[in-house]
Image (spheres, grey):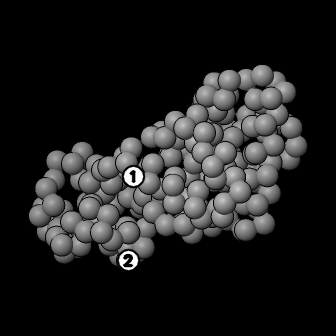
Amino acid sequence: MIHAYDKIYLDKARIALGRMLDFAVYDLQYDIEEFFNLFIHSGVSARFEIGEFWTGWALAYYQWETSMRFVEIVQYVPIKEILALYSPYHEMDIRQFVDKMNALYTAAKPETNLKLLRQKAGLCQRELAELSGVPIRTIQQYEQRQKNINKAQAEYLVMFSRVLCCEVEDLTEKVGDRASLL
């Protein structure tokens, strides 16, 4: 399921999650990676993702996620590497940070979700094109990130998901443009 979040919710969520991490690391003396892993595996991050929102320090015991896509990103970019970006980026426009995160994520995960799912299904690009009805050139462009699959026609995503036996959101990339993280 794809969620659209109200800008006010996102702003409050970012503030609460930032305070939670600050409290966990500096007051409770958690190692940032240890705490982050506890949060991710606690299941509370999934509840937070669907819009359940807590305020204050209670988040420190469960949650850390600055955006709804952060969980996917940190599977490829270590949290300590992201934390190290604070000093050079904290006074810059947020879009510069997002661009940097996109670059780190893309470098760490060179294969697109479409390509990974296609390969897992044991299909070549031509077979996927024939089964889905999507032109082979379009598939190539999505897999090479020449086209942003997050902006694909809904019809294409549905056809891919049927052929690859996955959800539409499994095909989308977790980063790709500034608007997706802001």
Image mark for residue 129: none
Residue at image point 82% right, 34% down: 23
Crowd around label 2: few <14 · some 14–19 · many ≥20 (10 Å): few
Side of 167 where 133 appears, left or right: left
Q: Secondary structure at mark 2?
A: loop
Circle 2 is placed at which residue position?
Answer: 153
Residue at image point 49% right, 41% down: 77
Mark 2–mark 1 distance (CA, rounded to whole Å): 22 Å
Q: Secondary structure at mark 1?
A: helix
Q: Is residue 176 above or below residue 63?
A: below
Q: Is residue 82 above or below residue 8?
A: above
Residue at image point 32% right, 64% down: 145
Q: 172 or 22: which is nearer to us?
A: 22
Image quarter (top left, top right, bottom left or bottom right) of the C terminus: bottom right
Side of 177 where 26 appears, left or right: right
Callout 1 amino acid = Thr
Circle 1 is placed at which residue position?
Answer: 106
Q: Quadrant of residue 173?
A: bottom left
Q: Is residue 3 above or below residue 77?
A: below
Image position, residue 19 (x, y; %): 81, 43
The mark lying in front, picked from 2 and 1, is 1
Residue at image point 69% right, 52% down: 90
| Residue 3 visible to an observer of this rendering | no
Image position, residue 28 (x, y; %): 81, 24
Image position, residue 139 (x, y; %): 23, 67
